[in-house]
Image (cartoon, helix red, strand yellow):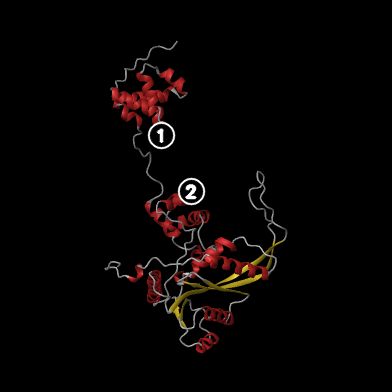
Amino acid sequence: MAGKTRLPKLALSAEQLSELQQLSQSRTASVREVQRARILCSYHAGGTVTGISQAMEITRKSVRKWIDKALAMGAEAALKDAYHRPRAPVITEQARAWVVHLACSKPKELGCAAELWTRSLLAQHVRREAMRAGHPSLTRAAKATVQRILAEQPLHPERVRYYLEKRDPAFEVGMRDVLLVYQEVALQNQAQRSGQGRPTVITVSVDEKPGLQAIANTVPDLPPVPGKHPNVGRDHEYKRLGTCSILAALDLHEGHVTARVERRHRSREFIALLKDLDQYYPVNCTIRIILDNHSAHISKETRAYLATRPNRFQYVLTPKHGSWLNIVETLFGKMARTFLRHIRVQSWEELRERILLGIAEINAAPVVHRWQKFDALVPANQDTI
């Protein structure tokens, strides 16, 4: 039979006891703090070291350790581990900086075949070159060691994030010209809603969506079955029937779309779109077109046609790498979300008819697309009006 403990009682105030009891039942605190709080509560209630160790299924040595610490330094000190570092770090700061330097270099520059580092490849190179570089602490560096060193920065040399270098010195000027047109269109639309007539300058946004594939199923799709197959079933195999280009002109006043679906995108197809616009709009107005400087838009053939229609068309070119400034891109996004996504046809001609049908549905309920951010027009030291 175990004898009665000779340890003194643990003196706790009512507030301390309440905090320990709450901590002993916590589900969010660390496991070790909860365990130590239970030990101290049990000992304060009269439990013995042996009884506590058996009830909590831990060693007597552990129970005695935290009770002794509470008796010597108080209950709060017993809940926490004292900070200690058993030995000095093996990997020096200079060695860590060397690994970071390697991660900021490309493997091909150091004699490797890879373009970018992986953690394994970088660890292998570190182990191979550590002694020669004067960092013997890294001769056995593992992949996890390299990962911890890079995580301190943090660095991800295995990832690529694309950006666009500004190569057009006139980009901001071109962007400003396009945004000024959008601002003028907004004022025109506001005046038209207040009762004024249609403006004499009609602005349309023009672009092409090339490379749209006509794809046919090899077997028919399987329809959804309630309770069995919630999705449409489609065989992985398919047949390519060619590609098409959508040439579209978006009216920024009424939302009407003038479009053509062609097999190719050349000057003659673009001229056909210009002829459609010329036929659609009244003869006494100017058609202002926002478009990029694609070769078909400024070719000799296109300029020859424009010369036959003097004062009819007016170009506003977006700057290089500024296709996102063209509002018609939002129309192409709408097409992709509504009727182009997952489309399957049995012929190229069917794809053309389906696209024209989708455009007709858009024209049945037109939406005026607006540019809503004009911060680029206002200098940094002025307020918007």
Q: Is residue 142 visible?
A: no
Q: Position of residue 69 (x, y in %)?
A: 33, 26
In the rendered image, the residue lying farthest to the front is 195
Instruction: Please tell me whether residue 273 is drawn above or below residue 352 in the rendered image.
Output: below
The nearer-to-camera label among 2 and 1 is: 1
Up-down relation of residue 45 to residue 171 (above or below): above
Q: From mark 2 to mark 1, how far is it between C-alphas?
A: 25 Å
Q: Toward the viewer: 299 or 270? A: 270
Q: Residues within 10 Å of mark 2 (few under 14, many from 20)?
A: few
The quarter in which the C terminus is drawn is: bottom left
Q: Residue 322 appears in which quarter of the rendering?
A: bottom left
User: Which one is in front, 192 or 176?
Assistant: 192
Residue 6: where, in percent of width, then height? 35, 15
Q: Amino acid at mark 2?
A: Ala
Residue displayed at 44% across by 49% down: 148
In percent of the image, x 67 and y 45: which residue is there? 228
- Residue 169's disc is none
Q: Which of the 4 image quarters holds residue 71?
A: top left
Q: Which residue corresponds to mark 2?
A: 144
Mark drawn on residue 30: 1
SS label for mark 1: loop
* Quadrant containing the N terminus in the rendered view: top left
* Farthest-out residue, top: 1
Observer able to see residue 99: yes
Q: Position of residue 101 (x, y in %)?
A: 42, 59
Q: Residue at x 36, y 68 (%)?
A: 374
Q: Earlier in the sequence, mark 2 or mark 1?
A: 1
Is 253 in front, or is 136?
253
As helix, strand or loop, the secondary structure at mark 2 comes to: helix
